[in-house]
Image (cartoon, rainbow, N blue to C red):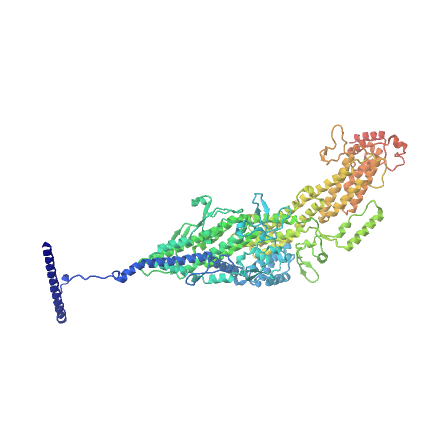
Amino acid sequence: GNQVDKKNNATDDKKKNDKKEESKNDDNKDSNSSNSKSDMDVDIDIDKDNLPLLKELRLEDTPFGIKAMELLPQIEHEVILGARRGLNKWFLSIRSGGGGDDSGSTASNSNGYTTPTQTQAGRAALRKCAASMAMGPGHLGLGGKLQGYTWRAKNADNLIARVNQSGRVARASRMGYWYPRDNTMEIDRLTRLSPMGMERRAEAFASSFGWYRCWNEHAPLEVEEVRVVDPGGGGVVGDAMNRSGHGMSRSSHGGMTSSRHGRNRSLNFRASHRRDNSLTLRTKGRKVGSKDIKEHSPWSMALTPAVLFDDAPTRLEDDEKLMVLPESVHPVRRAEAAFALLGKTDEFRQYYELNRFGDMKIGAGAGSGNGENNIEDNATNGKESHQTRSTLSSLTGDDVSQGTDRIFFQRSLPHFCTSVVGFSAIEAALELGNIQDDDDDDDDDGDGANAHKVTSNESGGIGSAKIATTGEEKQSSSSSSSFMASSARYERKLVAEVGTLIRNRAIGATLVELSRASCMLTAFRSALKIVHPSSTTRTYDKELLAMDVDILMTGLKVAQEEQLRATARILSEDSKEPMRATRSEFRYASQESSSGMESGSSGYNATSTNSVPLEEIVDFPFGLAKMKQNSSDESTFSEHGTGGDESNSRRQSMFHSLSGLQDPDTYKFSQAIPLIVRSIHARAIAFAAFSMSQEELGQVFASASNKGVGVAGYVLDCVEQCVTIAAIGIKDGYEHFDELSVPEAVQITANIATLQNCLPRLFGTLIRGLCHVGMVPEDRLNDTFAYADEALGRSDKACDQQVAGMFNSVYELCRNKIDTLLHFSLDNFQWVARSERDTPNTYCESLVEYLRTIFKCLRSLDEGSKAGLHFSCCGHISERLVMLIAGKPHNAQTEDVHISSTIHGEETNGLVPIAKIDAYGLKNLSIDVSEFESFADGTGIPQLRECFNELRIITDALLDVDLPKLLLPENENARRRKYPFLPLEKACHVLEKYQGTGLGGKLMGSTSKGSDFLMLEKKEIANLIKLARSQI
């Protein structure tokens, strides 16, 4: 019942409520109708406070809004992912697309934009800047129009004409060159061989130093001598490539034939097959893929990095990449705009800097055999000693600490430079179109090699999109400014790291590698100025890239080491025999000598019509073609012997008949000398190119050691040191002194003397080249030539020292051989002859034949050295014979005469004085002396016979029948008039050994009576000894 009541009550309440709502709705309708009527009729005051509140409907509350709120996070996420995906593709393309690949591959993003790699863009920029620098202003540089080369040649001729001609170098610089003739030939060669650009620059540089006037243009340079350390720790073993991990092995380059001394030929990375084939500079080509590229001349390849040539196979692709660079950075701009639209500018900045301006850990100098490098100081980084961080490795993807010096200079350095230039070009493209904001504050930068403040002269940095709201404008401006500061800071680190790498690697580089690296750095610095001039790093490029204040001294040291190795390599293949001269060369030299041109003249040939210097003879320049020894010198010695006059005349006629059938004319030098002079010339040109590139980098070289003549003084120092090293190498160009023969020693001496004779004209040719390329300041012209004379004097002195040392070696060899012959010939020789001979003794004939052979080998020497050796050898023979005859005899019971090697402090080499001699032995000795004197007269050396005066006086005095009278004290004046230089002490020693005739002689009738020479008995001998002792 209660439940039913409750239900009924609820139903009643519900009905009551429904009735109330209906009444209210009716009231509202009535009021609305009355209000509308009143509004139409009259204005009625409304109490707003008593009106009910209206409910607002937001967009988020609508069904569409609710759905949109669910999709917006997903859309934002997709926008962020798309922006990052575009950035990642862009990062990947600029680092991996193309870099060093000859195929010229490109990378494209999803929207069809062609994205260039920084390496390809950097290659194009480097190539264009290098070509522009080579051609110079108005295309009048060394690599430009040929009018500029002609003007430089005439200017050099005028400068040389203004110099005081009292110096040797000034006179020699006018020899072998005539402007109307030689300049025309050089212009024709440059026109035929090389187009304008870096190749013409290198060829013009070599031509200005007289290379093609002196040497065959088709011969290989062989200017690069590579030092390689033995992996087993055995030191330098020769020329080779480096580790196998770089895909460049020894066998892939050829041309490295080892010698018996363990030294190999120089290494040519690019075209080693040219050692075997003659170089046709423009007739051959090679293929890279499907593209044909032409061969470059040897000097252009030696002085120019391959990446700077205008005919590179990827030139068109690289140029296209560089041209579309401003349009290729749209992925970065869109990504920045997307992040800024979503209010995540800081996130974009962090993400971009992390991927663009990062660094990576590398091993500190791992695997570098020569010239290990540490990119940064480990102590300052607080890192472990075996690791360091490198920005350059992060940019290029290569570990800069790996690889040897050969790989670094050949492949790594060009890749690093092109990557950094490409980075700067991309950063400059990202700044295009940005609005300058003068309200940006200066940003203090303390990192890098030089801490300084970066002034935000330009806003923008990466991206130019700004949100047009007041609250975000300042944030976008600071973001752009910070990106520019980060970019400049990162760029400074890259440039500083490149400079540090080169400074560390320069210690183990070759001279050619230093020259190419300097040329690369010159183009590198110029390209940075062109592609990104607004960067604050441009102010500090010079300091960051400076190789070293003493870099030229490092180059001098490298040049010395290479010249020593080159000299040893050339001498290892030398036969040490005089070089044969062809008939054509001999005729040309004869015509030259008959024209009146002398080596000491001013260099102009005075003829009846004009005065024109004779041109250099190719492959025999600097007077080498004149240094011939004539066949007439072989007949200088009088053909005398034991065969009589008929046999002598028969020998002479046979000799002259053979001379008529063949050409016996030879040079004074061996075949190694032209090659050594050529290597010095080439090395001087390479060092001059290296020095000029250093000057173009902004280095200033004014040292007190070269009297302030500038970089030209260092080039002259290089020539002087190379000549000194070459002379030392020639002198030490044998393995063992005991195996060296006299003809070989004489040829070595002649080679050094020939090198010395070439020096004036070599210095003159090089100083003309220095004037031609502008390395001699006009205000220091006379000082430079004076310093050149001093350098030439020092080179002459160095050669004189080596010639003197070699002269002593030749004399020592001759003396040892003479002692050996005497010891062998006089072994068991009977000086008590008992009979008179009609011909000289056998030992005399063997000595004369040996002297004749040795003196014929001396034709290669100058007259002074030749005469000196003649006197030294003949004097040594006379001294030894005097010691044998007149030396104090030894007592065999008290000392071993075979072991004793000195007598009265003099070296005897096993020869000891004889114990007995008789009158016939003295008479036969007198015949031997006459034979020696006759041979001396036949040599053509004046007064050579005087070497045997002492021996002649002793024998003549002891054979003089008037000797007993002359030894009397009252006849002292008569004795001195007849024998003014007779040593009485030595005469006493001979008399002590004298064996009288005795009873046997009397029975045979051998007495002094009726004889033409003195024969003494024992009593007479004792009396003469007593008389001689009394007057000593």
> Is residue 896 rendered to the left or right of residue 650?
left
Q: Position of residue 869 (x, y in %)?
A: 72, 44
When asked about the image quadrant of residue 838, the answer is top right
Question: 645 or 22: nearer the eye?
Answer: 22
Q: Look at the image and tell me whether residue 454 can be seen.
A: no
In the rendered image of this protein, does residue 17 appear above or below residue 874?
below
> Is residue 382 rendered to the left or right of residue 775?
left
In the rendered image of this protein, does residue 799 appear above or below residue 607?
above
The N terminus is located in which quarter?
Answer: bottom left
When asked about the image quadrant of residue 976, the answer is top right
| Count of residue discs | 0
> Is residue 726 rendered to the left or right of residue 864?
left
Question: 18 or 218: nearer the eye?
Answer: 18
Q: Residue furthest bottom?
A: 41
The C terminus is located in which quarter?
Answer: top right
Q: Position of residue 818 (x, y in %)?
A: 74, 40
Question: 121 or 934: nearer the eye?
Answer: 121
Q: Look at the image and tell me whether residue 31 can be seen.
A: yes
Q: Position of residue 936 (x, y in %)?
A: 78, 44
In the rendered image of this protein, does residue 922 appear above or below residue 692?
above
Q: Residue at x 14, y 61 (%)?
A: 49
Q: Residue furthest top?
A: 893
Q: Position of residue 237 (x, y in %)?
A: 59, 46
Q: Residue at x 48, y 63 (%)?
A: 320
